[in-house]
């Protein structure tokens, strides 16, 4: 049975993703990994080579069998752009066709920023990256805070930008960047989950969770290699859980978001000004032994117990300013989780501070763009095996 053009495009894109992730580096490796015949893989690799996306180098000897020619992606074909933002700043990164980060920019936002200013600064950040190197921008991805509707290309709601309501961000950016640029969006924490898959600790994992006590508090769930979005695209909004768990009116993010934790540690008022760089400020508490520090770890343990009983993920990656509290903080959360939930003694959660840093959201958005892009076969035809 002959392959439909749409299927051909998806298969070409899948081969490129496998090569980009270095899950396979030869024709035979691709055939084995993807469950395809060597002849079929050969035809598609030849086509990608003819299009300039792939090239082959000299022979490489594996642990057994014949030497294989190693396949490489042409990093100069074009580039992927990822953008993440919040109410304070816009961050954008440039990733080349081979999947290597090449540049990053950050643009601060004014106090009490409005939607139009955010969109304008996003466009400026993307244009800044386009000036850094040559090549065509192939795909543009957004890690958007708050609720989103990826299928509609709409940012639904974000509490910290007052007029941020049902913003058609994909439509707006298509008008600013006309042409064949693919544009896609996802919630910023789910974008971060993709960054962990491509650049962080999730490379060898199909099940993991992003812990995001940042301006708010949410999680992103990777299950069986797929992002969990939820029926209303609201999966992971644990910051809206009642807190304490007796419905007194407060919510989890009121006590465990990064700003809330800072104010608890410093005994500051609820609306006290925050340091400009929370991550650096938290470093002073990495060795803290105060009662408040332990109370915070205990509160995180309560939340983690519920999460782990529900999800049983292989790993939980802590993101945001609280990573400055280090592995000791993560170990204490695990200890409190098990103390509060004895049933977890034989299945303790693994919590680690992410190594990706503050650019993780933008990097994840670039991964989103990279995974969404497919080759254009409008003017090409792939010959099918007999």
Image (cartoon, rainbow, N blue to C red):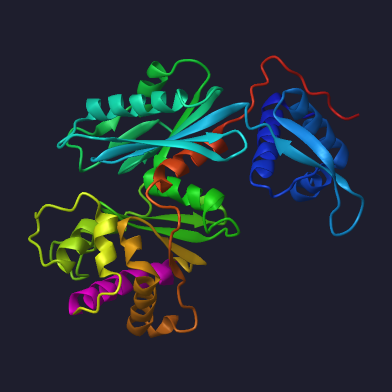
The residue lying toward the viewer, choosing from 81 and 347, is 81
Read off the magenta span.
291-310
Q: Position of residue 368 (x, y in %)?
A: 50, 39
Judge from the rendering whether residue 62 lies leftward or rightward of residue 245; answer left or right: right
> Where does the image place residue 38, in percent across and percent down from the top left?
86, 41
Confirm whether the magenta stretch covers residue 303: yes
Is 116 placed left or right of 105 in the picture? left
Main secondary structure along the magenta-highlighted residues: helix
Asked which quadrant contains residue 59, the reply is: top right
Residue in front for this viewpoint, 261 or 107: 107
What residue appears at the point 44 percent right and 45 percent down from the top-left corner? 191
Identify the image quadrant of residue 97. Answer: top right
Q: Residue at x 68, y 47 (%)?
A: 22
What quarter of the picture does the C terminus occupy?
Answer: top right
Tag count? 0
For image coordinates 34% across by 72% down, the residue present is: 329
Q: Is residue 257 visible?
A: no
- Residue 128 rendering spot, x and y as whole percentages: 40, 26
Task: Tell me where residue 116 appears, x and y as whole percent.
Answer: 24, 25
Q: Which is nearer the eye, 360 or 210?
A: 360
Please say whether residue 170 is one of the residues in the magenta stretch.
no
């Amino acid at each position: 049975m002959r392959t439909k053009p749409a299927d051909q495009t998806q298969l070409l894109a899948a081969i490129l993703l496998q090569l980009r992730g270095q899950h396979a580096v030869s024709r035979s490796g691709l055939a084995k990994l993807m469950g395809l015949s060597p002849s079929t893989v050969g035809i598609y690799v030849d086509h990608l080579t003819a299009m300039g996306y792939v090239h082959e180098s000299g022979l490489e000897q594996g642990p057994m069998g014949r030497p294989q020619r190693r396949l490489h992606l042409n990093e100069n074909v074009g580039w992927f752009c990822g953008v993440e933002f919040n109410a304070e700043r816009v961050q954008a990164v440039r990733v080349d066709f081979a999947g290597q980060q090449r540049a990053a920019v950050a643009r601060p936002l004014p106090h009490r920023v409005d939607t139009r200013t955010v969109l304008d600064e996003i466009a400026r950040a993307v244009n800044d990256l386009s000036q850094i190197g040559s090549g065509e921008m192939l795909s543009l991805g957004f890690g958007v805070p708050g609720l989103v509707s990826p299928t509609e290309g709409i940012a639904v709601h974000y509490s910290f930008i007052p007029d941020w309501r049902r913003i058609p961000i994909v439509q707006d950016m298509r008008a600013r960047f006309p042409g064949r640029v693919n544009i896609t969006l996802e919630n910023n924490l789910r974008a971060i989950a993709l960054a962990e898959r491509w650049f962080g600790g999730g490379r060898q994992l199909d099940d993991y969770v992003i812990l995001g006590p940042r301006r708010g508090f949410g999680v992103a769930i990777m299950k069986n290699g797929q992002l969990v979005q939820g029926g209303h695209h609201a999966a992971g909004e644990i910051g809206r859980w009642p807190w304490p768990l007796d419905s007194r009116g407060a919510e989890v993010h009121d006590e465990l978001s990064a700003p809330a934790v800072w104010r608890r540690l410093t005994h500051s008022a609820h609306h006290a000004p925050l340091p400009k760089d929370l991550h650096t400020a938290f470093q002073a508490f990495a060795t803290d032994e105060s009662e408040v520090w332990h109370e915070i770890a205990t509160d995180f343990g309560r939340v983690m117990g519920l999460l782990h009983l529900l999800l049983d993920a292989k790993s939980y990656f802590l993101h945001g300013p609280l990573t400055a509290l280090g592995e000791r903080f993560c170990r204490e959360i695990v200890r409190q989780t098990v103390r509060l939930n004895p049933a977890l003694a034989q299945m303790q959660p693994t919590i680690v501070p992410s190594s990706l840093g503050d650019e993780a959201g933008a990097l994840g958005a670039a991964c989103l763009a990279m995974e969404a892009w497919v080759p254009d076969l409008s003017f090409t035809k792939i010959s099918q095996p007999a």
